[in-house]
Amino acid sequence: MLRSLFSGISGLRAHQTMLDVTGNNISNVNTAGFKSSQVQFQDTLSQVLQNAGGAQQGVGGTNPAQVGLGVKVAGIVTNFQQGAAQLTNRSTDMMINGDGFFVVEKDGQQLYSRAGAFSFDSLGQLVTPDGGLVQGWAADAAGGVDLNAAVSPLRLPISTLMGAAATSNVSYAGNLPADAADGTVLNRQIDIYDGTGTARSLNLSFTKTATGWDIAGSIAGTSSTQTGSITFDTAGAISGLTFPSFPADAASGLPAVGVDLSTLTGYAGLETIAAEDQDGRPAGSLQSFIINSDGTLMGSFSNGLKQAIGRVALANFTNPGGLEKTGSSLYAATVNSGDAQVGAAGSGGRGSLTGGSLEMSNVDLSSEFTSLIVAQRGFQANSRVITTSDELLQELVNLKR
């Protein structure tokens, strides 16, 4: 039987595979996080008609004479080039800028994905569209994240709370007017919090004297009162300051509260004294969250404060091309991809994250349609080889009539 007949058949098979891969790329042109694939061909074994001959005295060398036996698919490679960004403004959508994969647990298996179209289920778990659990690290009560701990499913239930914290330090800033008349009284108030998050007013009263200012303080709902004084030199800097901390109040659960007045100044003509800050807070419930570029989920709470509530884990591989596609825009590690190196975004070669956006498919339609034409013409050319081989065989059969 003619070798060209089987070479043509191998060409049909190879170009059919090319057509299948190209069609799959085009069908996923709008699939978030999809990475296109390309087919690589190589020739099969060649039949030797004449071996090579070495040069001898008076005789030149000869090259081998071989006839190829067709083509085969050498491999199908995945193109991990970055896809375009699509703004969605959904807080649960995430996009990886650079290398890396989201870590997803599905049916007890750890898988990886570039598609960041996530949402919350009824348990507050961050999940993929088909129910895979997005992995990361939960934050502790103080907003700290231990990146050395094992990854686990990220949960952000509506009931997430930020605990109350009692005030232990209050700071004041600004200027006490040096030219104020003796007896001038300036009252300043700030809310502080006990261990249960109950607000209590801390009041400071500044009274101008011939030498400086007398200070009297009290905390509403307690018997705590303190007095002191502050003086300034001719340059407006503090030359003397006495004001002790408020002692702890066991009845209200309020700890000792220190008052920082060290940044006050005493220039003329300015009255800008004000309570600047305090380190306590009431309890708050989670209202919304945003994602930082390092994968940290920053929650906004009803008490007006923000705190880390978790961090998304990313994985990268020595050879991403060795990953196996498992469907649902997920990949599984193989012996040729190397082990997953899980860590935080923006470290260890892993890309950064963008919230409210999705990475679109990296399929280039112009290139794919060109490949479609190439596959079609290659298929047609190989079918013509088979037709021609058949005509030759027919002529051979017709020799005997």
Image (cartoon, helix red, strand yellow):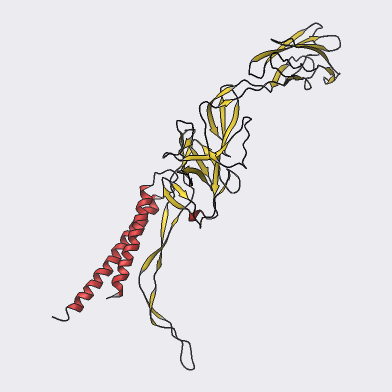
Which residue of the protein is positioned furthest toward the left in this rendering? 401
- Please report the residue visible at 60 percent of the width from the left and 29 percent of the height from the top: 307
Q: Is residue 23 visible?
A: yes
Q: Is residue 213 left or right of residue 315?
A: right
Which residue of the protein is positioned furthest toward the top in this rendering? 183
Image quadrant of residue 347? Answer: top right
The image shows residue 151 at horizontal and vertical percentages of 56, 41
- For this rendering, which residue is in front, 255 or 270? 255
- For this rendering, which residue is in front, 257 or 230? 257
Whether 355 is drawn above or below 219: the answer is below
- Please report the residue visible at 33 percent of the width from the left and 67 percent of the height from the top: 10
Image quadrant of residue 172? Answer: top right
The image shows residue 126 at horizontal and vertical percentages of 49, 35
- For this rendering, which residue is in front, 50 or 113? 113
Q: Is residue 173 visible?
A: no
- For this rendering, which residue is in front, 253 or 232? 253
- Please report the residue visible at 83 percent of the width from the left and 14 percent of the height from the top: 229
Whether 338 is drawn above or below 51: the answer is above
